[in-house]
Image (spheres, coloured by chain):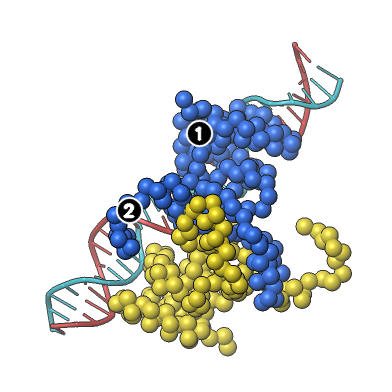
Chain colours: A yellow, B blue, C cyan, D red
Amino acid sequence: MGPRSGDPVALRLMERALDAQGLRHTLPRRTILEVVAAMGHPFTPSELTEQVAQRDPHIGRASVFRLLQLLRGCGLVERLHGPDGELYTLCLATEHHHHVTCTVCGRTATFSLEDDAAVGRAVERIGYRMDHHVLQVFGVCPACRDQEQPSLPPEGPR
Amino acid sequence: MGPRSGDPVALRLMERALDAQGLRHTLPRRTILEVVAAMGHPFTPSELTEQVAQRDPHIGRASVFRLLQLLRGCGLVERLHGPDGELYTLCLATEHHHHVTCTVCGRTATFSLEDDAAVGRAVERIGYRMDHHVLQVFGVCPACRDQEQPSLPPEGPR
DNA sequence: TGATTGTTGATACTTAGTATCAGTTAGAGG
DNA sequence: CCTCTAACTGATACTAAGTATCAACAATCA
């Protein structure tokens, strides 16, 4: 049912991006790409390596990290700093954007700010020249919000 | 010359915060606190443990991490996600703020946004309820800016 | 079909961080 | 001042991220 090779659009984009860098087509790469394309949520490196090993136990950890790095270089995968370690996520958005991660289900969405330059102005005010910035938001997604118990009083248990 | 036990204000604040939690005074803690207070810049865990070991080689790595965690709990130390791993920094600012880290010298400053609520609004627009957010900026501090070669054409070497 | 060069998996290493646990000690109460 | 106990400690060991190395291998070009 679920496509084992994931989002075909994402898959193609990633392969093209690697092609564009003059990188070779290999079976390990193809396998890892399929797994990445099949990931719906941000994933930890161990989740990824686990799923890759499920498809082909011969593929080494190093190759997974190597490909992650290549994909990050192409801007197709981003690394997020979760509170409990690093998260990688497939991200096809090309414009400047930020990520919201749902603290309940892990699903991630992207958004952008009306006035993104405000950050640059703020640091200029203290004499810094901005190079780049990372904004990471954690919250509750619409779906998980709906499933919250409406019976809970304002001060729910931790 | 340089005070070996660091900023006495920071030191006192940290000790008081630990006191307030009913934590005990011990020599290892005192030593680590002094090193943290003496750090002028954000530091990696290995930098910290190294300097601690210099003062007292008997202090274990675990105790260093334990204290870092306590200090983070008190809000006196923050963990930043540098591009090359984690950074911890002493931070006495109490209000909501963000960090700019100089990519040249490593010095960090804090700043705040005119309209910090804009982030919450932006994610609300896509249906999320914001829990918390992390904004991390990298750039060049005023001092390092001054020391840049003015002879370089707009396209300097990487 | 080679030859070349990029890629691979294995191995080993570094660093962050946590868990466990027996021994030690701060410091409260008597 | 002593005693008791909970807090704290260092040692050890473990998981996980990530990088380096290197000989074997395979994708692609001629």
**Residue D4 x %, y %:** 78, 26
The residue at 51%/27% (across/down) is: B3
Visible residue check, residue B131: yes
B17, C20: nearer the viewer: B17
Given residues A96 and D22, the one toward you in this image is A96
Judging by the rendered image, the residue that carries numbered circle 2 is B150
Q: What amino acid is found at the position of numbered circle 2 in the picture? A: Pro
Given residues C5 and D1, the one toward you in this image is C5
Could you say which quadrant of the image residue A60 lies in?
A: bottom left
Residue under the point 54% across and 48% down? B109
- In the image, residue C12 lies at what x, y percent? 35, 51
Q: Residue at x 57, y 64 (%)?
A: A118
- A27 sits to left or right of B10: left
Q: Nearer the viewer, residue A114 or A43?
A: A114
Q: Nearer the viewer, mark 2 or mark 1?
A: 2
Chain letter for mark 1 = B
Report in which chain the residue with disc 2 lies. B
Would you call the spot at circle 2 few (<14 residues within 10 Å), some (14-19), or many (20 or more)?
Answer: few
Q: Establish if B94 lies above or below B6.
A: below
Quarter of the image for the C terminus of chain B: give it. bottom left
Answer yes or no: are tags 2 and 1 on the same subunit.
Answer: yes
> Is B85 placed above or below A73 here?
above
Can residue A67 be seen in the rendering of this structure? no
Q: Is residue B61 left or right of residue D18?
A: right
- Residue pointed to by mark 1: B52
Q: Residue furthest bottom?
A: A1
Instruction: Give how far apart the Cα atoms at labels 2 and 1 are.
Output: 40 Å
Dot 1 falls on a residue whose secondary structure is helix
- Kind of residue at disc 1: Val
